[in-house]
Image: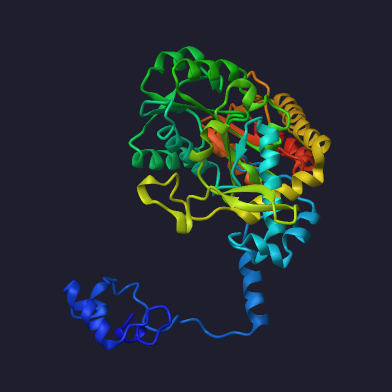
């Protein structure tokens, strides 16, 4: 940047005299002195990229993408791939959805606002809780927001958040980042066979615990069997019970409200997005008691002056309404378009098909684990639990070596221990299980 960059700009309309006055007040001689950019990364006006035609660029990009491994990904641990019907793309790609950033002008955004209201309504029905916002960044930030919410709820005191000792590393790291800003300490409680160790959790609970977090299913795919007991323990110590899940799992597993959950967080993009390699949509639902403490945006419904139903953003606490340290959240956007895709996908499935999809998430890993267990050198599943989408398998040979050999056969799986692999199977990879079993039988003994 040079001094000339600011003159004549509609975004910084400063005359030479105004610029000089500001620089003098700051105590520097030039605009350039405000920036400390190392020479190695300083832009010198030349990107050093040769101009090419569109055809040449497409050819080059195709060549680069062709170097990617063509692998069947049996990967999970927080990111899941379900078939997304083409209807979702066709509706979500309409211009009124693609070009709408934030629906601040309800008079021109009724369609988008209604979809987001339906999205909230679906999450309320799935969780049994009273309030859901119209999306957050991802599951990790939603969990972080739950921890900060625990500090704003008057009925809760304490500064400790208890979480499972096995949970997605990225989710734990984001939570700790949030917790540091709110002076909350994150501590791990033990697990037994991949589920909550209730006795150990109870021993850690005290009046200084603000939140207890559990996941269903867990990061290893096990279905948590003691949710009601966890909820009772949290309630007995006046702590928030936060449950992590997703819309597909919620269609079949225990309803969070029925087991005492105060907050539900997770990844809503298991519907509508497909494999996104890290991108997600944070779901956040809670009790009506905490309505004014909910982070993010809420769409409300009322009537216009003609008596017709009308939608608008309500109880906003972000963007131009932010209150810095007094705000419920300092995230200044959401995932409205991706939440829209989730709502379209859920509506396309309907209640019956959504339950059928969730049932497949139980039967597919169960059947695959049973087949792998027949292979010499493989024990599956490792955990004596019901599973959802994924499970762990123990290998006699080192897991890293098995995973490398499987990669050579065209499959990607997670290595989670010296002799532990984690395998995820959904409707999008169900037709590859025969080949995967054959490959495992080839490389495992």
Q: Is residue 248 left or right of residue 47?
A: right
Residue sitting nearer the eye, 6 or 345: 6
Quadrant housing residue 67: bottom right
Q: Which residue shows up at 71% across the image and 51% down it? A: 115
Q: Position of residue 217 (x, y in %)?
A: 62, 29
Image height check: is 163 above or below 103? above
Quadrant housing residue 291: top right
Q: Position of residue 68 (x, y in %)?
A: 62, 59
Residue sitting nearer the eye, 385 or 36: 36
Q: Residue 274: in sight, yes or no?
A: no
Q: Which residue shows up at 71% across the image and 67% down it? A: 95
Residue sitting nearer the eye, 28 or 152: 152
Q: Residue 75: in sight, yes or no?
A: yes
Split into 4 quadrants, where in the image is the N terminus? bottom left
The residue most toward the right is 352
Q: Which residue shows up at 42% across the image and 29% down it? A: 154
Residue sitting nearer the eye, 148 or 443: 148
Split into 4 quadrants, where in the image is the C terminus? top right
Q: Position of residue 143 (x, y in %)?
A: 50, 38
């Amino acid at each position: 940047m040079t001094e000339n960059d600011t003159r004549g700009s509609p975004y910084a309309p400063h005359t030479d005299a105004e610029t000089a006055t500001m620089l003098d007040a700051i105590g520097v001689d030039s605009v350039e002195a405000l920036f400390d950019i190392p020479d190695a990364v300083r832009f010198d006006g030349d990107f050093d990229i040769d101009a090419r035609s569109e055809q040449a660029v497409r050819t080059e990009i195709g060549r680069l993408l062709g170097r990617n491994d063509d692998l069947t990904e049996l990967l999970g641990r927080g990111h899941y791939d379900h078939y997304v019907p083409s209807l979702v793309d066709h509706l979500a790609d309409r211009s009124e959805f693609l070009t709408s950033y934030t629906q601040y002008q309800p008079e021109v955004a009724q369609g988008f606002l209604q979809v987001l209201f339906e999205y909230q309504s679906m999450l309320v029905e799935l969780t049994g809780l009273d309030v859901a916002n119209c999306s957050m960044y991802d599951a990790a930030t939603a969990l972080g927001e739950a921890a900060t919410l625990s500090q704003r709820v008057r009925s809760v005191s304490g500064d400790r958040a208890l979480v499972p000792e096995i949970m997605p590393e990225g989710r734990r790291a984001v939570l700790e980042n949030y917790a540091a800003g709110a002076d909350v300490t994150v501590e791990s409680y033990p697990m037994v066979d991949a589920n909550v160790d209730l006795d150990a959790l109870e021993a850690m609970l005290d009046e200084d615990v603000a939140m207890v977090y559990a996941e269903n299913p867990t990061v290893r795919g096990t279905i948590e069997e003691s949710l009601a007991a966890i909820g009772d323990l949290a309630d007995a110590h006046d702590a928030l019970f936060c449950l992590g899940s997703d819309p597909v799992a919620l269609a079949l597993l225990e309803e969070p409200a029925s087991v005492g959950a105060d907050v539900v967080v997770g990844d809503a993009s298991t519907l509508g997005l497909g494999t996104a390699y890290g991108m997600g949509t944070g779901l956040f639902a809670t009790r009506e008691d905490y309505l004014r403490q909910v982070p993010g945006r809420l769409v409300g419904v009322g009537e216009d002056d003609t008596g017709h139903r009308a939608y608008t953003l309500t109880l906003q606490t972000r963007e131009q309404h932010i209150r810095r340290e007094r705000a419920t959240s300092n995230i200044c956007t959401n995932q409205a378009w991706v939440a829209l895709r989730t709502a379209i996908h859920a509506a396309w499935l309907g209640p019956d098909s959504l339950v059928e999809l969730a049932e497949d998430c139980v039967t597919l890993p169960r059947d695959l684990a049973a087949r792998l267990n027949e292979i010499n050198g493989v024990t599956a599943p490792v955990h004596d639990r019901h599973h959802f989408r994924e499970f762990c398998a123990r290998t006699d040979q080192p897991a890293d070596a098995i995973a490398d050999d499987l990669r050579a056969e065209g499959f990607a799986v997670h290595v989670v221990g010296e002799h532990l692999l984690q395998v995820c199977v959904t409707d999008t990879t169900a037709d590859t299980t025969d080949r995967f079993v054959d490959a495992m039988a080839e490389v495992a003994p």
